[in-house]
Amino acid sequence: MSVLKERIEFYHTLATLLEAGIPISRVLEQRFQGKFRRAARTLSDGLAGGLTLHAAMRSTPLFSRFECSLTAAGESTGRLPDVFHTLEEWFALNQRLRGRIISGLLYPIFLYLVSMCIFAIFDLLTTEKELSQIVLETLFRLLVPFIAYALFRLLSGLFLHRALTGRIIDLLPILGSLQHKLESARFFKAFGLCLATGLGIEQSIQLSADCCRNQAFRDRYLRLKEILRRKSCTFSEAFAEIQTRRDLAAAIPEMLQTGEQSGNLDVYANRISKLCSDEATLLLERISKLLPPLVYLILVVFIAKKIIEVVSFYTNMLHDLM
């Protein structure tokens, strides 16, 4: 079972048992799957030692900043079951999107691997390279997709959360839009949860900003607190000070104004979160459909290059014979 599926089951169990009235200390005694069995024991020990649940989660590398911050909001508002259902749905969405991307790439990658083996045979028959050199080159080509994936995971873990990375991604047409929708969905989901249970605006902003993955977005949303203190204005007026063209395109300012005028800002914050999440899903599906043709294009270029090399080899050989 993948870690992502284990995470979904972990939050589903927490939400279901807490809704049934079972104390969190008893819930964490359940036999969870994989890494979460040990994590549950660590959380249980932390609670026994006087830590809050979100503080105990922060001491465990298995949980992200988003999970810890949203749990902190749930503890502050007394809505932990709702928070855990939200996390369950969030990671279930991630699992579906990841599955679509992987399934779309499986066949192109299979073709790539088969093609590399065929090209190795061509090299053996049409070049003067040593067998050991051909084997090494072929092994490297076969490993390229897996090396690229490993590098992507490593670099994203090291740099994706940094403010500079967020600003650079924001300049890109598709990835910038995707980042904005995902971060907006995180912020407004937590913001709606906090407001629904009576937390103040500033405390809600602080907890919700901590849910953002990228530092640039955390800093941006935290500016709302400064604007509110300095101008003593409404939340929608403060948001107008930091809004971007992507916020305007998603009609976020208008929805915030409507929420304040109707006295249902928490409801409209949840609607904004759902809207951004749905749009991010559609955008990721579009990206997943673009990846296979891109792999095919790279493969076609590589095949064309090999065909030219083979034709050139035999042309030169015929020329030498004549």
Image (cartoon, rainbow, N blue to C red):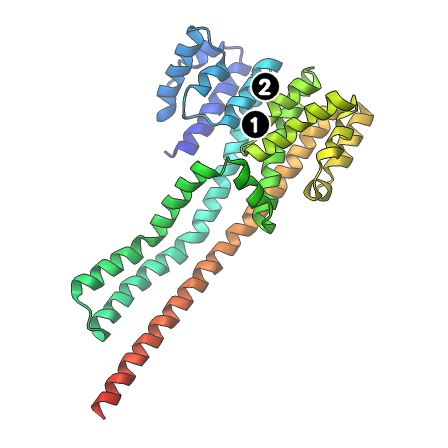
Tally of marks: 2
Left or right: residue 62 versus residue 142 is right
Q: Residues within 10 Å of mark 1 (few under 14, many from 20)?
A: many
Q: Can residue 211 be seen in this view?
A: yes
Residue drawn 39% across and 10% down?
45
**What's under tag 1, amino acid-wise?**
Cys
Location of residue 251 in the rendering, given as x and y in whole percent from the top left corner: 74, 40
Left or right: residue 159 versus residue 275 is left
Quarter of image, res 187: top right
**Can you say which quadrant of the picture contains the N terminus?**
top left
Left or right: residue 254 versus residue 210 is right
**Can you say which quadrant of the picture contains the C terminus?**
bottom left
Q: Residue 50 carries which label?
A: none
| Nearer to us in this view, 272 or 248 | 248
Left or right: residue 207 versus residue 130 is right
Q: Is label 1 in contact with label 2 (beta carbons under 8 Å)?
A: yes
Please tell me whether residue 135 is drawn above or below residue 148 in the rendered image: below
Residue drawn 65% across and 18% down?
203
* Farthest left residue in view: 131
**What's under tag 2, amino acid-wise?**
Ala
* Farthest bottom residue in view: 322
Location of residue 243 in the rendering, given as x and y in whole percent from the top left corner: 71, 37
Please tell me whether residue 106 is drawn above or below residue 120 in the rendered image: above
**What element does badge 1 sit on?**
loop
Q: Is residue 33 visible?
A: no
Residue drawn 69% across and 29% down?
269
**What element does badge 2 sit on?**
helix
Residue at mark 1 to residue at mark 2: CA–CA distance? 9 Å
Residue drawn 57% across and 31% down?
212
Residue at the disc numbered 1: 211
Q: Residues within 10 Å of mark 2 (few under 14, many from 20)?
A: many
Q: Which mark is residue 73?
A: 2
